[in-house]
Amino acid sequence: MRQVGVIGVGEYLPKRVLTNADLEKMVDTSDEWITTRTGIKERRLAAPDEATSDLAIKAAQKALEDAKLKPEDLDLIIVATITPDMQFPSVASMLQNGLSASKAVAFDISAACAGFVYGITIAQQFISCGTYKNALVIGAEKLSGITDWQDRNTCVLFGDGAGACVLSEVKTGGILSTYLSCDGSKMDLLNMPAGGSRNPASHETVDRRLHYIKMQGNDLFKIAVRSMTEAAEIVAKKAGLGLEDLDLIIPHQANMRIIMAVAKKIGLPEEKIYLNIAKYGNMSSACTATALCEAVKEGRIKKGDKVLLDAFGAGLVCGACIIEW
Ligand code: COA
C-alpha cells in the first residue's frame, strides 16, 4: 500500500463580513450572547451571484498551485458539501469542467460537517491501492442560502467558505490513521426538511420555511463533545500514538465551548488547538478544510508535526484523521 499525504492546500472566503452587531439589527440577539455561547464574532457571506462551486474553484486553484500540479494531473475530485449549486449535476463535475481537469473522475459526498474528513479518507483509499495518483478534496458551503435569517437559534451560527487539499503519494509521513462513524438514529436533530424527494419544493414547503436548517442545538452539543472526544482517542490509538504526541488539533468549528470541552477531555492545552471560529463561524465541511490551510500558511504546522482533524455533524456523522506533515 502507498503512503498518502497532503501536498497542497488552498482556501477561499467570500469578501462580505457579517458581524454580531449586524445580526443584532436582524434578530433578537446580542454580541454578548453570541460571543459567550458560541465564540463567534463574525462570519463571511457569499454574494447573491456566488454559488458553492464558485467558492470551491477558487480554493481548488490555490491548492493546485501550492501542490505545483496542473489541473490535468488530477485523477479524482471529491467535493464535500450539503449546499450544492443544484440537486444535480454535482459540484465536483462543475469543478472538473471549470478547472479543465479533463482526466479526473468527480463526485460529491454528503457527510455534512465531517465531509472534508470523509473525503480525505475516501481519496486515501483510491491512492493507497494505486487506482489514482492525485486527488483534490474540497469542503465548500454556501450555508447562508439555507439559513433562516429570522431564526435566532440558528442564524448566528453559520457562514460560507471553501477549503481544499491535494492528496498524493508521499515518501515520508502522510495519513497515519482515519476513523469514520455514523449514528443515523439521531439524524432528526439536524436537517433541512424540504427540497428533496421526501418533501419536494412547493408553495407549502416554502410557506412553512422548510428549506432552512432545523437544529436541536442543545442535544447536539452533548453528543458532539462525546463523539469528537471518542474519535480523537480511537484515531490516535489506531496510529499507535498517545494524545500527548499530537502537535495540533484542527476541530470542527461549531462552537467554542464544544471545542474547549473536547480539549479538556483529551487533556490538551489551548495552544495545541487551531481556532478560526471567531472570524468564520460554522461553515460545515469548509471548517476543517479552511483551518488546515490557514494553519499551514501561518506556520502552525511544521514538517514532522502530527495533526489531528476531528469533525462532527448532521447524520449524525463523525470523522477524524491524523496526518504527519
Ligand atoms: N441570542 C440570544 N438568545 C438566544 C439565541 C440568540 N442568538 N439563540 C438562542 N437563545 C436563547 C434560547 O431561546 C434560550 O432561551 P430560553 O432559556 O429563554 O428558552 C437560551 O438562549 C438558551 O438556549 P440553548 O439552546 O439552551 O443555548 P445553548 O447554550 O445550548 O447554545 C447553541 C445554543 C446552538 C449555540 C449550542 O447548543 C450549540 O452550539 N449546539 C451544537 C451545535 C452543533 O454542534 N451542531 C452540529 C454540528 S454542525
Image (tube, rainbow, N blue to C red):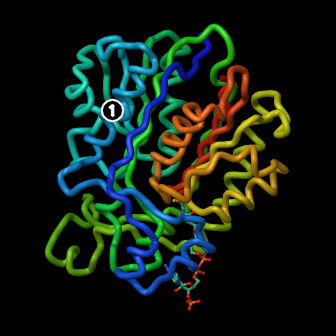
Q: Horizontally, is 265 left or right of 19 in the view?
A: right
Q: Horizontally, is 166 left or right of 234 in the view?
A: left
Q: Horizontally, is 254 left or right of 144 in the view?
A: right
Look at the image and tell me in which quarter the C terminus lies: top right
Q: Is mark 1 within 8 Å of ligand 1?
A: no
Q: Residue at x 75, y 40 (%)?
A: 234
Instruction: Check disc 1 and give the amino acid type.
Output: Phe
Query: Image quadrant of residue 73?
Result: top left
Relative to the observer, which residue lies in front, 267 or 117? 267
Question: Which residue lies under the disc numbered 1?
Answer: 107
Q: Residue at x 52, y 65 (%)?
A: 41
Q: Residue at x 68, y 37 (%)?
A: 308
Residue 228, x across and y down, in percent: 68, 52
Relative to the observer, which residue lies in front, 313 or 249? 249
Using the rendered image of the protein, determine whether residue 214 is visible from the camera's viewpoint: yes
Relative to the observer, which residue lies in front, 118 or 324? 324
Using the rendered image of the protein, determine whether residue 81 is visible from the camera's viewpoint: no
Quadrant assignment for ligand 1? bottom right
Mark 1 neighbour class, 10 Å CA radius: few under 14, some 14 to 19, many 20 or more: some
Residue 191, x across and y down, in percent: 42, 64
Q: Is residue 131 above or below residue 110?
A: above
Query: Image quadrant of residue 196?
Result: bottom left
Q: Residue furthest left?
A: 203
Residue 176, x across and y down, in percent: 69, 24
Q: Horizontally, is 286 left or right of 221 in the view?
A: left
Residue 260, x across and y down, in percent: 72, 59
Q: Is residue 246 above or below residue 261?
A: above
* Secondary element type, mark 1: strand
